[in-house]
Image: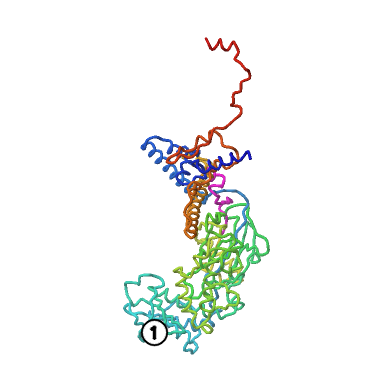
Amino acid sequence: GATAPGKKITARLKRTLPVRGPQAPTLSELMRWYCLNTNTHGCRRIVVSRGRLRRFIWILLTLSAVGLILWQCAELLMNYYSASVSVTVQFQKLPFPAVTICNINPYKYSSMKDYLSELDKETKKALETFYGFSEGKSKVRRSVDERNSTGSDFFKQIPLLKFEDFSKTVIDLRSGQKRKIEGSVFHKDSSIVNSGDSNDIIGFQLCDANNSSECALYTFSSGVNAIQEWYKLHYMNIMAQIPLETKEKLSYSADDLLLTCFFDGLSCDKRHFTRFHHPLHGNCYTFNSGENGTILSTSTGGSEYGLQVVLFIDEADYNPFLVTSTGAKIIVHDQNEYPFIEDIGTEIETAAATSIGMHFTRSRKLSKPYSDCTETGADIPVENLYNKSYSLQICLHSCFQKAMVDSCGCAQYAQPLPAGAEYCNYKKNPNWMYCYYRLHEKFVKEQLGCQQICKDACSFKEWALTTSIAQWPSTVSEDWMLRVLSWDKGQKINKKLNKTDLANLMVFYKDLNERFISENPANTLVILLSNFGGQLGLWMSCSVVCVIEIVEVFFIDSLSIVMRRQWQKAKKWWNDRKRDRSGKPPQAGDLERQGHDNPVCIDEDLPTFNTALRLPLPQDNPLPRTPPPNYSTLRLETAFTEQLPDTLEVGQH
């Protein structure tokens, strides 16, 4: 029909017109089209600039701008995950923290003598053997049951040893004879052995019960440290075999420890304290524990409105080998936190008034991706053994206890029991000491993985303590004060207390300023996108649409061109292979039919004059050109049979 010539012309144009734009056949043509049509002026100047020098300058400037954009955007991304710290101070009524108090001596020595008689006897024998110490010359006021006993197998297996000349020749405590021992040497309290007298090196040997050739020697440059460590090792083994109810009776009661109590100017008593049993410190008492659902608060700062207690220490009933200092240990903590007395406890002196001023601070850190902290500890693969809110210390202690149970088959005495486990003792677990020391060595060297698993808590409360000490009671008031306290204690009036048995403690807020330290994102998503846009506009005069255009041209269109060329090569190879198999010679029209469709003429409209002008000039063989259009409006038809007279005159003129 009538549209047949138009379709033929369209097909011819699609085959012969040079293709530009996203459908360009080559990457170079695509890049040229992009530079001429993009909104980034630098790319356009690269193409339209005349002269190599000018073009090189524009290429250098454009690449520099791109580099600056990438650098600035990388800085913006790194700053996006940073946090700013803000500090807010508020003056208000503050909740009073929990205050846990423990006697440094965990159990009354008079009650523990029957359980520790053999251990004390071995310790005194070591002092006499190594240092010529005899009880008659000592200031120790206690006597140990000297019943006929050669000692248990436990003491025979792990005796105290004295090393000679930095060698592995030792003097055995029990036999007094020299012998050679084998094993790796570990110095517990110093990496450098005392360079003075080598005879001062004391230690003990731990061997694997399943393999006697596997031994470790633990030496100490101080004889005091060696004897205390050896004593504690056997002490934990004995205490692990005593039931909890019995140990609570052997330790101090609230009536034993507390003499007087005041809080916020009002009298208080043992009913305001909650007892909990600590494996290493015996019975401890927590003021304002919040167990009954009530947490005390204070509306006034100063020592007169805090907690004031007088403690009865009873130095005469101290274990001479277990503890070497006298007094009490306290820790200030939140009601939901576990009091780690052995880690961060503060020691209180006897015969002194200790004032502890507090500053309260609440802190909150941002979790991932800003910091590697945990909100509740639920994402940490370690069971919380303390039944308190998560903290880093709880996680580390729980992780070590779990490793102890898995590796040694029993739990370490100083930490809570996991479900289904029992504390280690030499009778049931003869290998636990060697296993414990080996495991603790790995823990300190961060080889157990606990330090890698456990994380800081994102939210925590902290009481910064300022301690001051004064002599108490004063010389002029000592006599009457000690007599009154003796009466209150129930002693006879003629037997007053010794001031070294007493400690005065005051815990109070120095001010009621609550400091809240919080982390906030330094940048939000809106600010980040705005900064990106500013950098793109500053260096490349580019917008989001320009970025989309870059993605389309450099990724989508470039990949399309590469895939299309590969497809054309594969198609040509397949056609050549088919022709070779059939034996047909290539037809003359094949070359003319080869080419590509021109997307400029993808529509069905007839070609325009401007489109036709874009046809390339013929090269070797002239191709048939499109004939001019045969429009009827261009035909001149005479409307008159003869020329008018006036026109003739004009023509003559």
Residue at 53% in and 72% down = 401
Residue 263 seen in the figure: yes
Image spot of residue 503 (x, y percent): 54, 65
Residue 285 x/y as whole percent: 60, 67
Which quadrant, please, contains the N terminus? top right
Q: In the current view of this chain or complex, which residue is farthest to the front?
A: 641
Give, as a three-letter code, the residue at label 1: Asp
Image location (x, y in percent) of residue 27: 46, 47
Q: Secondary structure at mark 1?
A: strand
Q: Position of residue 294 (x, y in %)?
A: 67, 60
Residue 169 to residue 364: above or below: below
Classify mark 1: residues with Cα within 10 Å, few (<14), some (14-19) or many (20+).
many
Identify which residue, 35 or 316, lies in the foreground.
Answer: 35
Q: Nearer the viewer, residue 453 or 86?
A: 453
Determine if residue 541 is in view: no
**Which stretch is magenta?**
507-532
Is residue 324 magenta-colored?
no
The answer to which image quadrant residue 158 occupies is bottom left
State which quadrant residue 58 falls in.
top left
Which residue is tagged 1?
A: 172
